[in-house]
């Protein structure tokens, strides 16, 4: 009996030690994660501070800066061409945004979400309609143009940008808010709530473009 009791006590102590050890390890992991997050926030804060001398440009402020500093247009083309990887798309999309007063980075983010800047992007829907090109224009919505010029008419870069930007501009006029306009653009109704994943991706990428733009502005001396 004493031997059994000794073994039982030993097992009990081992179980307690294992239990305590697991909690100690868990606490160490939590503390380590906390320290890592704190370091991450400090680094991010330092980054933002570094590039916040004369920014932050966002929304139509980006358009305003470009319009006032057209002497930097070649550098601006290079900036956005690094994103699109297609100079024709960059130039036509940028100038359309400036001409129609569409927030540049918002529109570039929308196109990235829709097609990854692929002018030949194609998506076949359950109703057999086809979403075409940069702005993923639906073949049923633009049927009259397809009937007149074939479906390739919608894949033409200039046509696609023209129709796509007109569509999002009409959605904005109906909602008075660019992000609410995405619900109309994506779902087709002012009463449609935009898909959170869809909206989140566009907002995040717009912020990335804002950051890149502000870094560029500060690299040439800040506000002009």
Image (spheres, grey):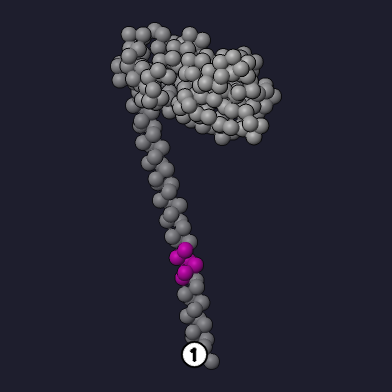
* In the image, farthest residue toward the right: 191
Q: What residue is rendered at 34% in x and 20% in y?
A: 78
Left or right: residue 190 compared with residue 94: right
Q: Does the magenta stretch include residue 47?
A: no
Query: Is 156 on the left-hand or right-hand side of 191?
Result: left
Residue 14 visible to the viewer: yes
Under circle 1, the secondary element is: helix
Q: In which quarter of the image is residue 215?
A: top left
Provide the major secondary structure of the magenta segment: helix
Identify which residue is drawn at 41% across, 37% down.
41
User: Is residue 165 at least partly visible in the picture?
Assistant: no
Question: Which quadrant of the figure contains the C terminus?
Answer: top left
Q: In the displayed structure, would residue 26 be above or below residue 130?
A: below
Residue 129 lies, in percent from the top left, at 62, 28
Residue at the spot 51% in from the left edge and 10% down from the top edge: 100
- Crowdedness near tag 1: few (<14), some (14–19) or many (≥20) residues, C-alpha within 10 Å: few
Foreground residue among 99 and 160: 160
Q: Residue at x 41, y 8 (%)?
A: 67
Residue position marked by numbered label 1 in the rendering? 3
The answer to which quarter of the image holds residue 136 is top right
- Across and down, in percent, residue 216 comes to 34, 20
Farthest residue in the left direction? 220
Magenta range: 17-22
Query: Is 29 on the left or on the right of 220, as rendered?
Result: right
């Amino acid at each position: 009996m004493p031997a059994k009791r000794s073994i039982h006590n030993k097992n009990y102590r081992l179980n307690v030690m294992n239990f305590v050890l697991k909690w100690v390890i868990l606490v160490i992991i939590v503390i380590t994660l906390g320290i890592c997050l704190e370091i991450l926030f400090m680094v991010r804060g330092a980054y933002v501070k570094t590039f916040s001398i004369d920014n932050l440009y966002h929304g139509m402020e980006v358009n305003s800066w470009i319009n006032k500093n057209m002497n930097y247009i070649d550098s601006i083309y290079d900036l956005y061409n690094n994103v699109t990887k297609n100079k024709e798309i960059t130039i036509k999309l940028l100038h359309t945004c400036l001409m129609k007063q569409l927030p540049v980075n918002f529109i570039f983010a929308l196109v990235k979400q829709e097609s990854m800047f692929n002018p030949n992007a194609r998506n076949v829907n359950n109703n057999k309609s086809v979403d075409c090109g940069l702005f993923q224009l639906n073949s049923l919505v633009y049927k009259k143009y397809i009937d007149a010029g074939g479906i390739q008419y919608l894949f033409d870069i200039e046509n696609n940008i023209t129709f796509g930007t007109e569509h999002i501009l009409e959605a904005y006029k109906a909602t008075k808010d660019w992000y609410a306009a995405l619900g109309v653009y994506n779902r087709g109704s002012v009463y449609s709530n935009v898909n959170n994943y869809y909206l989140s991706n566009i907002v995040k990428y717009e912020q990335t473009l804002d950051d890149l733009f502000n870094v560029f502005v500060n690299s040439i001396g800040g506000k002009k």
